[in-house]
Image (cartoon, grey):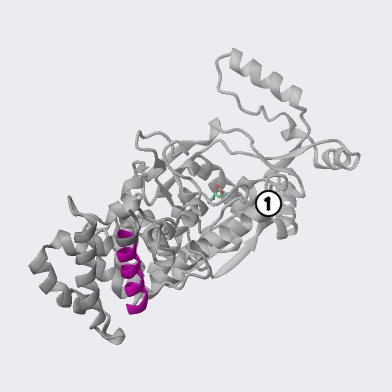
Amino acid sequence: MPTESTRVRFAPSPTGPLHIGSARTALFNWIFARATGGKFILRIEDTDFERSKEEYVKDITEGLSWLGLEWDKFYKQSERIEIYRKHLERLVQEDKAYPCFCTKEELEGERQAMLSQGLAPKYSGKCRGIPKDEAKHRIEAGEGYVIRFKTPEIEVSFKDLVRGTLRFDASLIGDFVIARDFNQPLYQFAVVVDDLDMKITHVIRGDDHISNTPKQILIAKAFGAEQLPYFAHIPMILNPDRSKMSKRFADTSLKEYIDKGYLSQAVVNFLALLGWHPQDDQEVMTVDEIIKKFDISRVQKGGAVFDSDKLNWFNSHYIAHLPTEEILRAAAGFVPENWKINAPMLESVRTRLSNLGKLREALEFYFALPDYEKELLRWKEMDDRRVWNGLESSLRLIEEIPAGLFKKDALEAKLTFAVEEKGKGEILWPLRVALSGKKNSPGPFEIMEALGKEETMRRVRLAMDKVQKQP
Ligand code: GLU
């Protein structure tokens, strides 16, 4: 296989938001292109004018960009209608396709007749014999028609890179429709024109397309194509109960994951393992590692179960381990604009987050101290007096640390003496509550570093006032 010239395409129909399964198809294509030094083409298949929407094209391109899957070329089928028309005319001219004038009722009648004879229904080929001139006149006279492909009654076989050799009996297919008219090509046709025209070397797509492949091979052969693309049909994504992936078990559009605060690194890592895994079974991988290890022949045949817990695990992992700067950048969309989140704030909460959507709640206490009850300051049976004493000892020690050295290790070292003398609960519990106003929060030293000296002291004094003033 010549590696430097591989060309793959991701060919979504913009009839809905980018599905997480389609994102996986895009990812496999992109990885394959990058792994083989080839080109990744994005082709929007929008020949179904009624169902295709510009907003979905936007959702698709934004989703791919978010995942980091930059494309080398961009096409829209709606801008190529003229090309398809020429190719349709050519096939009709060469007697490899023909206009069919059968009405819906006629077709339904034929279908029923075949069914009643116990036959699998297929088009009878009735309009095959209409002379080209006659067909032309009927079209010009405004008669309704479609264009059918003259399906040869042969065996079609191809070697799928995932599933091995697959064989189909084309005599069962019948003459299928390839265009509504000369200006309205259907998927089956446009996809072949484009795959040949764009010199696609590998068609990597979901295995729900397997039954389309023999039809597409026949059309390509009708064009006299010498070199067909290789095909790799990748496994369906399944619910945990092995039914087809649905909303019942998990969000299905990529946008939902983006909006909930999943990191692209986590989603890419997770999707790469849906139906593939490297030889060494490594799970956490950077994109570069995935590209290095990717091997299409290791893609599995059987369905790939979408395990949300695993995705959450990856996300927590990346939130906890990526460089702080990267997380701060990704966090921007999830917290109010006026929050100035510093690195220690993020460090204090990042190991407990499964997604960035939870960041706001986790960090809120830094920006507005909750109005907590003074009882919360008490560790076990401590009374107000002991709470006050504990806070006061902390305050005196904290005060001695210069603002420039206000770091968690220095703070911890400074408070050690008081902690050893009076006990952890007695000192650290009231201090932590004074700083966070919450029952559960990061530890006091981390919070103090994040708040800085001035705000730390203000909060401790506030707590001392609370126990002193409140009856
Ligand atoms: N437009 C088709 C789809 O969205 C693409 C199929 C293909 O990759 O050939 O399913």
Label 1 within 8 A of ligand 1 by Cβ: no
- Viewer-nearest residue: 226 or 113: 113
| Magenta span of residues | 453-467
Label 1 sits on residue: 53
- Total tally of numbered discs in the picture: 1
Image x and y of residue 434, in percent: 30, 63
Residue 89 magenta-highlighted: no
- Viewer-nearest residue: 185 or 427: 427
Residue 464 magenta-highlighted: yes
Q: Residue at x 38, y 54 (%)?
A: 271
Q: Residues within 10 Å of mark 1 (few under 14, many from 20)?
A: some
Image x and y of residue 68, in percent: 46, 67
In the figure, is residue 258 to the left or right of 36?
right
Q: Residue at x 54, y 52 (%)?
A: 18
Image x and y of residue 293, in percent: 29, 64
Q: Residue furthest left?
A: 421
Q: Is residue 224 above or below residue 341?
A: above
Q: Is residue 189 above or below residue 329?
A: above
Circle 1 SS class: loop
Q: Does residue 290 appear in this view?
A: no
- Viewer-nearest residue: 443 or 353: 443
- Viewer-nearest residue: 188 or 397: 397
